[in-house]
Image: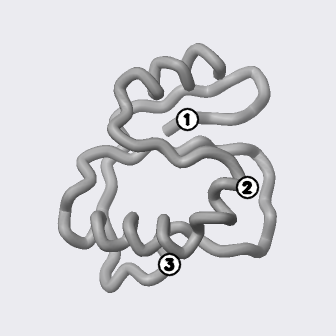
Amino acid sequence: MFRHSVENFDRADALLFGRVTYEMMEAAARKHVVSSTEKGLIDEYEFALHPKLAGHGPTLFAGLSKSVDLRLVSRQEFGSGAASA
């Protein structure tokens, strides 16, 4: 998964890191992601999925005025059970 992350860093225009950063910038990040999504400014999302359900907490896309249809273009599974899609 490390090699995959490094490759993503090399090609990314913007990055958000970890829970502490996310918690510090949660409102601003959500507003930016929702606004950019609704304006059609994001051409690709990459989600790191971990096999654990939290059952609580905020969601990044809360506040979208309409649903967004996504198309899966790639998927990679890791030995830890995590997946990148």
Residue appearing at x 53%, y 48% in the figure:
16
**Where is residue 54 shown, x and y percent of the image?**
80, 64
Q: Is residue 32 left or right of residue 30?
A: left
For the residue pair 32 and 75, the one nearer the viewer reads as: 32
Residue appearing at x 73%, y 55% in the figure:
20
| Dot 2 and dot 3 residues touching (CB under 8 Å) | no
**Image-quadrant location for residue 32:** bottom left
Looking at the rendered structure, the secondary structure element under dot 1 is strand
**Image-quadrant location for residue 40:** bottom left
Q: Earlier in the sequence, mark 2 or mark 3?
A: 2
Q: Which mark is residue 84?
A: 1
Q: Residues within 10 Å of mark 2 (few under 14, many from 20)?
A: few
Q: Nearer the viewer, mark 2 or mark 3?
A: 2
Residue at the extreme top = 3
Looking at the rendered structure, the secondary structure element under dot 2 is helix
Residue at the extreme left = 40
**Where is residue 72 shown, x and y percent of the image?**
37, 42
Relative to 69, say whether 51 is above or below: above
Residue appearing at x 53%, y 19% in the figure:
6
* Alpha carbon distance from label 1 to label 2: 21 Å
**Where is residue 70 shown, x and y percent of the image?**
33, 55
* Alpha carbon distance from label 2 to label 3: 19 Å
Q: Amino acid at mark 1?
A: Ser
Q: Which mark is residue 7?
A: none
Q: Which mark is residue 62?
A: 3
Residue appearing at x 24%, y 48% in the figure:
43
Pointer 2 residue: 20
Q: Amino acid at mark 2?
A: Val
Q: Is residue 15 left or right of residue 45?
A: right
Q: Amino acid at mark 3?
A: Ala
Relative to 78, say whether 15 is above or below: below
